[in-house]
Image (cartoon, grey):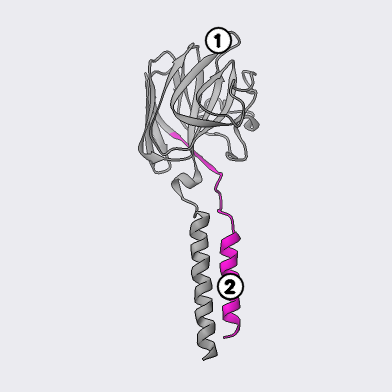
Amino acid sequence: MRFRPLFLLCLGAGLLITPGAFADTTTWANITAGGSGTASGNIGSVNFTYTGETAFVDLSGSATTNYFQPTSTYTSATVTNAPNDHALIAIDGTATVHTITFSTAVTGLIFSEVSMGQGGVATTYNFNQDFTVLSCGPNAFFGGGCFNQAVGTTTNVLSGNEADGTIEFLGPITSLTWTGANPEFWNGFDIGLLSQSTSPVPEPSSLMLLGTGLLSGVAAMRRRMRR
């Protein structure tokens, strides 16, 4: 009996210091349908639809090129896995409004971009939500480099001259909308959700409450043992 309080104390301490598992793994979109100006699919249990205009849509698992290479351009400390199922929504940017609508509000929305703009055309997107630039760099097929907004920048405007990389919208977001300037043929994107968006990782405050409860239980047990 004397060892049980010590065991519970160690267990509580372990829970307090154990980091959330897979907190930075991204679940990428499963794009199942695409047509003229539309695309749809799901990210885990969350359904989504895109409306605006499309140059073409590559469905998930199709025998097409995986444009999200090299993976170092699209990964970071936050996003550790790049899209790899050959899915892509390619747009010219000519539509007045582009909209992605989700079946439920999402947080940790990841947006990876391929070939935004060209040498003499700085394509620009104005989003209705702020985002943070997580990574950027050249593309294996088109060359290019970073966005005009540096890594770490938080803004709602994204622009580039043959730019590639990944940005994050914190949310919660039910509908992501953006308008474009200086359209070109073509640039493309894929979207995903950080794992805590669909499988929440306990907050430190929650772990602290759990640890406090365990320690209180240990104290009560010790008092009973002294009687």
**Residue at (50, 45) in percent of width and height:** 195
Q: Quarter of the image holding residue 7?
A: bottom right
**Mark in front: 2 vs 1:** 2
Secondary structure state at the residue bearing disc 1:
loop
Establish if 135 lies above or below 223.
above
* Front in this rendered view, residue 222 or 47: 222
Q: CA distance from mark 2 to mark 1?
A: 62 Å
Q: Quarter of the image holding residue 105?
A: top left
Badge 2 crowding class, 10 Å Cα cut-off, few under 14, some 14 to 19, many 20 or more, is some
Numbered tag placed on residue 130 in the rendering: none
Numbered tag placed on residue 121 in the rendering: 1
Q: Is residue 133 left or right of residue 60?
A: right
* Residue 35 visible in rendering: no
Asked whether 12 falls inside the magenta stretch, the response is yes
Establish if 205 lies above or below 68.
below
Q: Which span is picked out in magenta?
A: 1-30
Which percent across, then down, holds residue 89? 46, 24
Location of mark 2 (residue): 9
The type of residue carrying mark 2 is Leu
- State the quadrant of the N terminus: bottom right
